[in-house]
Each structure stands twice: as structure tokens, then as C-alpha cells.
Amino acid sequence: MFKFDDNRDKIVHYAHKKPAAKAASREEFEKRLCQVADLLNLITLSIAIFRLVVLTAPSLTSVASVGDMSNFPKPSLGWIQKIAVPARQIAGPFSAPGQACELDLATMTRHDGTLTVSGIRPEGIMLIWTGGQTAPGNADCGSHAQILIPEANYTRLITAETPAYVR
């Protein structure tokens, strides 16, 4: 498109719409770039939250593995850390918690024995005790017992100074 100047001796060219289109496409490009940046920030935040949940969820990581054994030999020094933790014998066809009993570290080391991890459940660690008494009196679980114990109590028991832990 042309337009004559007032002097009529010069022809002036009208600017085509292309520069305006370039400006619009530039704005659109910047808008899409911001959207991509927002999406990347969202993905990064999601990954960070997922890692936080996985690393802090106690049910996803256990201190025990099936087959772990903790030996409770007779102590050579004569002193034993005083730890007694509540437990339940496993009874019934579906391994339902049964009669309450106790795991007393001093009694278990005095009578010698081994705890073996037979399973891990949401409510605790399933153990098999093979050895002598687990506690004095009526709190004894028996010389060969299947036991359910909370994971925190299992950790207290195996990290005591007396048992020899075998994995």
C-alpha cells in the first residue's frame, strides 16, 4: 500500500501488519515459556514431596528382614542391660495376636536362645524364639514360641549391648 505525501513527489510505504504480528508472537512465546517454567517448578516440587514422604514413612522401611537372627548368649561379664518389652504370642490359623507375654533381656541371656524374624506386619515384627525362658514367672512366652512385637520394641531389644546380631 502506498500513500502520497503532501508534496506529491514522494511515495510513503505503509508498514505491513507483520511487526505487530511479531510482537504478538513474542508475547505468546513468553507466555508459553512462563507456563513451561511453572510446569517444571511443579514437577520439581512433586519430586521433593515424594522423596520426603518416602524417606520419612516408617512403614516403608523396616529395621528387620525375614530371616534375621539375634543370638542371646550367656554374658561373659556378668552384667546385663535391664530391658523388658511386652509381646504377644501368635495364635490361631491367621496368626492373630494371642496371650500377652514379655521378652526380658536378662532372663533371655541367662537361659541362652535365639530370636529369628519370621515375618513383618503393619502391627509389628513376627519372631520365633528358640531357647530357654523369655521372662520370669507367668510372663514367660515359652521355650519355643511365635511372638508378635512392635518394631520399636524389637529395635530396643536387638540394639541392647548383650545380643549378638546376625544378618
Image: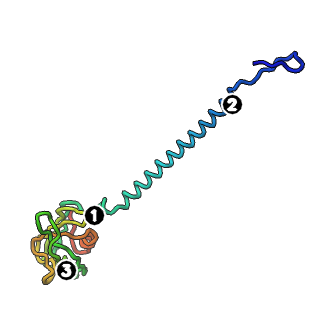
Q: Earlier in the sequence, mark 1 or mark 2?
A: 2
Residue 132 position (above or below residue 50): below
The amino acid beneath tag 3 is Ala
Secondary structure of residue under mark 1: loop
Q: Is residue 42 above or below residue 119?
A: above
Q: How dense is the environment of label 1, judged by Cα within 10 Å: few (below 14), some, or many (20 and up)?
A: few
In three-dimensional space, the C-alpha distance between marks 1 and 2, rounded to whole angstroms, equals 66 Å
Q: Where in the figure is residue 62, as x and y percent of width and height?
A: 28, 62
Whether residue 74 is visible, yes or no, is: no
- Going from N to C along the chain, the mark reached first, 2 or 3, is 2
Residue 16 visible: yes
What whole-number distance in Å separates the C-alpha atoms at marks 2 and 3? 87 Å
Q: Quadrant of the N terminus?
A: top right
Question: In the image, which disc is placed on residue 63?
Answer: 1
Residue type of the residue flagged with mark 1: Val
Q: Earlier in the sequence, mark 3 or mark 1?
A: 1
Q: x%, y% of residue 144?
A: 9, 71
At horizontal 22% and vertical 80% (from top left) the residue drawn is 80
User: What residue lies at 30% left-to-right and 62% top-to-bottom?
Assistant: 59
The residue that mark 3 highlights is 106
Where's residue 23, x and y in %? 67, 33
Left/right of residue 116 with respect to residue 7 in the rendered view: left
Circle 1 or circle 2, nearest the eye: 2
Specify the amino acid type for callout 2.
Ala
Does dot 3 land on a helix, a strand or a loop? Answer: helix
Mark seen at residue 20: 2
Q: Which image quadrant is residue 37 in?
A: top right
